[in-house]
Each structure stands twice: as structure tokens, then as C-alpha cells.
Image (cartoon, rainbow, N blue to C red):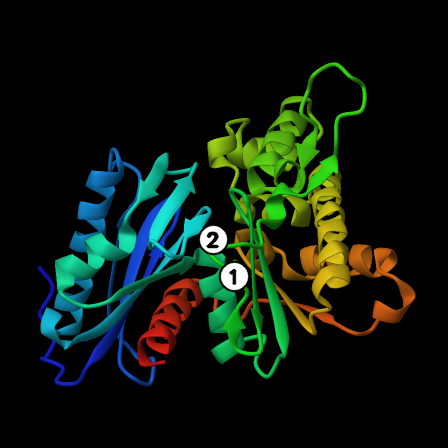
């Protein structure tokens, strides 16, 4: 058992990231210095009720790590996947968790006798980058995080871009190749073509066909073994087919970025997630070139595309900062 930290006397803010594979909670002071943290796997919590109970356990562990009592909590911010009902404080749907209509704010707020505030997890990430990272001083910042899906969020004039009742910026569901043949298939979306799951599937097929010997040696053909880091290592080792697959994905994401530029005219677009962290130059530059090739002339040079700076801290820090903004407003 780890040694309990010395008790911290001041008020604290909790940031919570309800990711697809792990739950992460951090305890921050008013200067957003980390006082304590805890995480657990999301998988294994069968059903929303078990998941909510696990969220409480993770927060309690973070408080214990920080040497803080629940009564010191000023507010809890929770970054959640999927469309959210912001009026009710609920997750409407989180397909990767199989959660529907889950009352996050009420449950977590009641458990710790304080106010809880939800936001989309990518909104939380880009809000943190806006406050402390790659989008500092931006008027309009858009965050795009390719991972299991394609998450996106935006901050305009210091406010998260949100609908009247629901979260927005579901960029991953932009149709790329809509069905035109009449055979009844649904076509494909940005998420279906650009997610890491799609890249891993294509990479596994390439390895099976003998087109990616280095990836085959390190991962075999099981897509669960094909991480962003392994993809990057295979490219560095000379697997040209893996590089082609990753670049194709980045080009298509660049098409989505061009759409965002025409809609919002952001001054900064922040790319984050494992793919970007593993191969920032290749991925970001390919997205940048693809977007620039597709935007109208007046928009060229009006924005920049950069890699996220805060990595794993972004979601929890942004969730805590947003909760504080809402609570202290």
C-alpha cells in the first residue's frame, strides 16, 4: 500500500476523463497543479450502474492519493464520450460503452455532495489546449482527436461550441462516400475511414498478405496488438504499405478539416490522440497538406494545424477547468 500523502488544506477541483478503455481522475488545486490521481480500466464494469459505481471509486482513490477530503471539492468536471444531453446532464449514447441515457451529473454530484458538470471529452481536451496548451490566445480553436472513433470539439471566444440542448461537433459522422449504387449499403463516414480501428484493420490485412513484414513480426495479424506506436515503428523499419495506409487516413481527415475551415474559420486546429503522438510529423503534415489543397483560396493561410501539447492531461484538466468556469459564472 502506498504511503498516504500529507493532508492538503485548500479547495480542490476534480477532473475526470471517461475514456473508452480507462477512467482517469485527477485532483487539482486552484492553479491546476496535480495533487493526486487514480485510474482504472473502463472495461469490466458491466452496465451503466456498475460504471457509475466505478467512477465514484476512482474519484475516491484520487482524493486519497491527494490527501484530500470530499468536503474540500469545489466541483467535478467529467469529460464523456458520445452525444450528451447538456440540459439533463446525461450521456445520451456512448456506443463504445453501450451506455444510454446515463445521469452522470446527478449521480456523481450526489455521491460527493457537490456540483458535477459534464462536457464532451474532446471539448474538454480542446478547452485545456485553449487554456494551457497548443491553442493559447486563439479566438476559435478546433480539436480533432482520431482514435477508436473521430472526436472533435471547438472553443469560440472562451466558450465551448455547444447546441441548445445537446453537444455537437460530431465530425466523425460526416459522410465521405455516400451510397450511390442502390445496393442498400450505407456508405462510409470520416470515422469509418480514418479511425485507428480502420487503420489497424487495414494494417493487419497488409501483414497477412506479406506487405508489411516488420509489422507482422512485431504484432502478427491480431488488430488488438496493433497500436499507434507499433504502426509508427513499422513505418520507421520500412513498411511502405503501412505508411500508405496511415497517409490515406490522414488525407481523408484533411478533407474533414477543410470542411471545418469552411464552416467555422478557426485560427487553430489541434490534432491529438495516439496516432498524432506516435507519428506527429508524418500525420500532422499529411493532414495539413490535404486540408490546404482543398480549402478555398481566401482561407489558405488563415489557420494553422498543430499537434496537441498536453497529451493525457488534456481531458481531465479541461473538464476541471470547464466545471470551474460554469460553477463560478
On the image, numbered disc 2 is attached to which residue? Answer: 166
User: Which quarter of the image is occupied by the C terminus?
Assistant: bottom left
* x, y percent for residue 153: 55, 60
* x, y percent for residue 72: 14, 77
Q: CA distance from mark 2 to mark 1?
A: 7 Å
* Residue at x 57%, y 81% (from the top left corner): 136
* Residue at x 26%, y 39% (from the top left corner): 48
Quick one: which residue is furthest to the right in this view? 297
Name the image quarter holding residue 248. top right
User: Which quarter of the image is occupied by the N terminus?
Assistant: bottom left
Query: On the rendered structure, is 145 left or right of 117?
Result: right
Give SS at disc 2: loop
On the image, numbered disc 1 is attached to which residue? Answer: 162
Dot 2 alpha-carbon crowd within 10 angstroms: few under 14, some 14 to 19, many 20 or more: some
User: Is 264 in front, or is 151?
Assistant: 264
Q: Is residue 15 above or below residue 237?
A: below
* x, y percent for residue 117: 32, 64
Question: Would residue 69 be visible to someone looking at this image?
Answer: no
Question: Would residue 221 be visible to someone looking at this image?
Answer: yes
Give SS at disc 1: loop
* Residue at x 74%, y 72% (from the top left corner): 303
Dot 1 alpha-carbon crowd within 10 angstroms: few under 14, some 14 to 19, many 20 or more: some
Query: On the rendered structure, is 106 left or right of 217?
Result: left
- The answer to the question of whether label 2 and label 1 lie on touching residues, with beta carbons closer than 8 A, is yes
* x, y percent for residue 16: 31, 61
Q: Is residue 281 above or below residue 22?
A: below
Amino acid at each position: 500500500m502506498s504511503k498516504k500523502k500529507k493532508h492538503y488544506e485548500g479547495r480542490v477541483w476534480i477532473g475526470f476523463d471517461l475514456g473508452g478503455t480507462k477512467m482517469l481522475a485527477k485532483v487539482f488545486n486552484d492553479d491546476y497543479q496535480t495533487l493526486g490521481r487514480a485510474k482504472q480500466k473502463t472495461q469490466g464494469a458491466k452496465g451503466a450502474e456498475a460504471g457509475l459505481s466505478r467512477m465514484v471509486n476512482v474519484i475516491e482513490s484520487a482524493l486519497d492519493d491527494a490527501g484530500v477530503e470530499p468536503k474540500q471539492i469545489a466541483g467535478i468536471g467529467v469529460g464523456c464520450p458520445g452525444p450528451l444531453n447538456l440540459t439533463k446532464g446525461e450521456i445520451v449514447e456512448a456506443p463504445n460503452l453501450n451506455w444510454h441515457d446515463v445521469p452522470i451529473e446527478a449521480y456523481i454530484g450526489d455521491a460527493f455532495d457537490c456540483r458535477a458538470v459534464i462536457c464532451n471529452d474532446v471539448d474538454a481536451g480542446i478547452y485545456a489546449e485553449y487554456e494551457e496548451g497548443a491553442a493559447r490566445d486563439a479566438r476559435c480553436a478546433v480539436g480533432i482527436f482520431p482514435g477508436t472513433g473521430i472526436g472533435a470539439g471547438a472553443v469560440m471566444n472562451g466558450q465551448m461550441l455547444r447546441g441548445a440542448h445537446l453537444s455537437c461537433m460530431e465530425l466523425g459522422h460526416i459522410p465521405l462516400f455516400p451510397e450511390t449504387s442502390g445496393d442498400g449499403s450505407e456508405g462510409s463516414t470520416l470515422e469509418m475511414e480514418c479511425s485507428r480501428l480502420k487503420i489497424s484493420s487495414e494494417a493487419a490485412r497488409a501483414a497477412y498478405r506479406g506487405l508489411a513484414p516488420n509489422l507482422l513480426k512485431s504484432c502478427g495479424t491480431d488488430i488488438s496488438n496493433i497500436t499507434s506506436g507499433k504502426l509508427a515503428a513499422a513505418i520507421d523499419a520500412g513498411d511502405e504499405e503501412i505508411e500508405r495506409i496511415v497517409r490515406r487516413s490522414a488525407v481523408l481527415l484533411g478533407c474533414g478539416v477543410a470542411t471545418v475551415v469552411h464552416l467555422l474559420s478557426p485560427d487553430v486546429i489541434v490534432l491529438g490522440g495516439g496516432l498524432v503522438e506516435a507519428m506527429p510529423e508524418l500525420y500532422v503534415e499529411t493532414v495539413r497538406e490535404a486540408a490546404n489543397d482543398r480549402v478555398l483560396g481566401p482561407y489558405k493561410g488563415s489557420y494553422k494545424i498543430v499537434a496537441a501539447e498536453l497529451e493525457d492531461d488534456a481531458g481531465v484538466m479541461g473538464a476541471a477547468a470547464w466545471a470551474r468556469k460554469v460553477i463560478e459564472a
